[in-house]
Image (cartoon, rainbow, N blue to C red):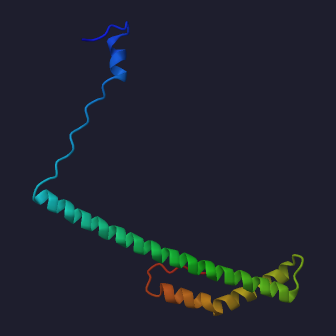
């Protein structure tokens, strides 16, 4: 029997009983289970492909960061050689041009041809 509290019945019900949970889905038999396993294998393959692509992109990013650091070091080296303490447009242009040429004559060119020889999209380092 219900106790009389003076509250509206709806107010009592809100805090009380929980809604019934949906019954768990039954595992499908035969063909459906095989279909799920096939789909699971396909998804695992896609995950493996995405992980491999991420590894390659990370390696490319690391390689480009190393090349960028080398270019910055070349520029610093040329600036030190020319003793550029203040900004001089002509000398700075010469520094960047020389540093870029030495940079491209070295590892950067090898990196570009090695990584993108068979690639349809060949990004330029210029």
Quarter assignment of residue 7: top left
User: Which residue is pictured at 88% across the width and 85% down the height?
Assistant: 83
From where the camera sits, is residue 85 visible?
yes
Relative image position of residue 93 (x, y in whole percent): 79, 82
Q: Is 18 on the left-hand or right-hand side of 70?
A: left
| Number of on-image labels | 0
The structure residue drawn at horizontal position 33% and vertical position 7%, both measured from the top left corner, is: 4
Q: Which residue is drawn at 30% across and 70% down?
A: 45
Q: In this view, does 83 lie to the left or right of 47?
A: right
Task: Tell me what residue is drawn at x 47 percent, y 88 percent.
Answer: 117
The quadrant of the image that shows the C terminus is bottom right
The extreme bottom residue here reads 105
Q: Where is residue 67 in the image (x, y as percent from the top left)?
A: 63, 82
Camera-side residue: 37 or 6? Answer: 6
Relative vertical location of residue 99 with respect to residue 32 in this rendering, above or below: below
Query: Taking 25 as reference, is 71 left or right?
Result: right
* Of the pair 27 and 93, the residue shown nearer to us: 27
Above or below residue 23? Residue 33 is below
Can you give x and y, in whole percent of width and height, for residue 73 in the image? 73, 83
Assign the N terminus to one quadrant of the image.
Answer: top left
């Amino acid at each position: 029997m219900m106790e009389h509290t003076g509250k509206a019945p709806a107010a009592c019900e809100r805090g009380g009983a929980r809604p019934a949970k949906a019954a768990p889905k039954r595992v499908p038999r035969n063909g459906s289970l095989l279909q799920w396993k096939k789909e699971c294998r396909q998804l695992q393959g896609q995950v493996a492909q995405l992980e491999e692509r991420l590894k390659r992109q990370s390696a490319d990013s690391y390689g480009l960061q190393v090349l960028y650091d080398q270019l910055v070091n070349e520029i610093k080296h040329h600036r030190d050689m020319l003793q550029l303490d203040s900004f001089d447009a002509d000398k700075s242009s010469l520094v960047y041009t020389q540093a870029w040429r030495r940079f491209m004559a070295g590892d950067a060119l090898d990196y570009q041809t090695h990584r993108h020889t068979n690639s349809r999209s060949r990004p330029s380092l210029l």
